[in-house]
Image (cartoon, grey):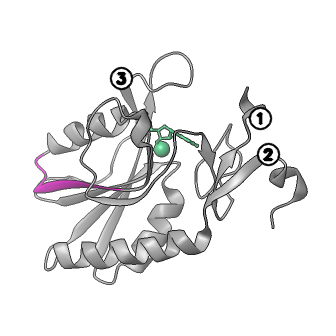
Amino acid sequence: MYAREIEADLTEVLVTEAQIQEKLAELARRIEADYEGREILLVGVLKGAVMVMADLARELRPHVRTDWMAVSSYGAGTESSGVVRILKDLDTDLTGRHVLIVEDIIDSGLTLSWLLANLKSRGTASVEICALLRKPDAARVDVTVKYLGFDIPNQFVVGYGLDYAERYRNLRDVAILAPHIYS
Ligand code: XMP
Ligand code: MG
């Protein structure tokens, strides 16, 4: 399915392209019903959320606006520290807007918990979260995700926007990265 050198890097496909599309359609119908008559501003978190944003936005039938933020977690190693730096801020004034944050994955929850507080402080009418994936066993803070795709085991995954060292984002499925790649 993927090039042989990519297949060798993956342990298993966790969520298939078809499962992702089916779930996004289901979430889109809920979002449309919940926001009826109110315009949503979808805020995508670069770069991982690019694929979710592209597919979710096209699944939504009413007008939506889209904007992007890039953030990075400070701190040593691969673990999120909770101290977040804005690398690219929104172009949109959030006053009175209904913001729906679009994320690829919630791991510790530290990044989203910071982002939620940051966006709420800008005069928004509402802020909710849509995340494709969540690792419940990695949670360090409680983040309420109104629109969730899939709970997954606490393993490093790639594909559908998720990377390891900027690779694998172009895979159509979400797959577990073989530990020999990163250890
Ligand atoms: P926290 O821990 O703050 O971090 O919830 C969420 C961010 O960490 C990245 N992340 C991953 N990226 N595969 C990835 O490619 C993973 O399994 C993974 N877990 C966490 C991701 O950037 C996410 O936004
Ligand atoms: Mg991300």
User: Earlier along the polypeptide chain: callout 1 or callout 2?
Assistant: 2
Q: Which one is closest to the eye, mark 3 or mark 1?
A: 1
Residue topped by disc 3: 83
Q: Is residue 132 visible?
A: yes
Observer-nearest residue: 42 or 182?
182
Q: Is residue 35 visible?
A: no
Over which residues does the magenta segment extend?
123-130
**Dots 2, 3 in contact, CB < 8 A:** no
Q: Name which quarter of the figure residue 73 lies in.
A: top left
Q: Is residue 62 left or right of residue 85?
A: left
Relative to 170, say whether 118 is above or below: above
Relative to 54, say whether 134 is above or below: above
Query: Which residue is located at x 56 percent, y 25 percent?
Result: 78
Q: Amino acid at mark 1?
A: Ile
Q: How busy is the neighbourhood of tag 3: few (under 14 within 10 Å), some, or many (20 plus)?
A: few
Query: Which residue is located at x 74 percent, y 48 percent?
Result: 11
**Tally of numbered tags:** 3
Looking at the picture, how far across and down is residue 106, in whole percent? 41, 43
Q: Is residue 13 left or right of residue 29?
A: right
What is the spatial separation of the Cα atoms under label 1 and label 2, in whole angstroms? 7 Å
Quarter of the figure with the N terminus: bottom right
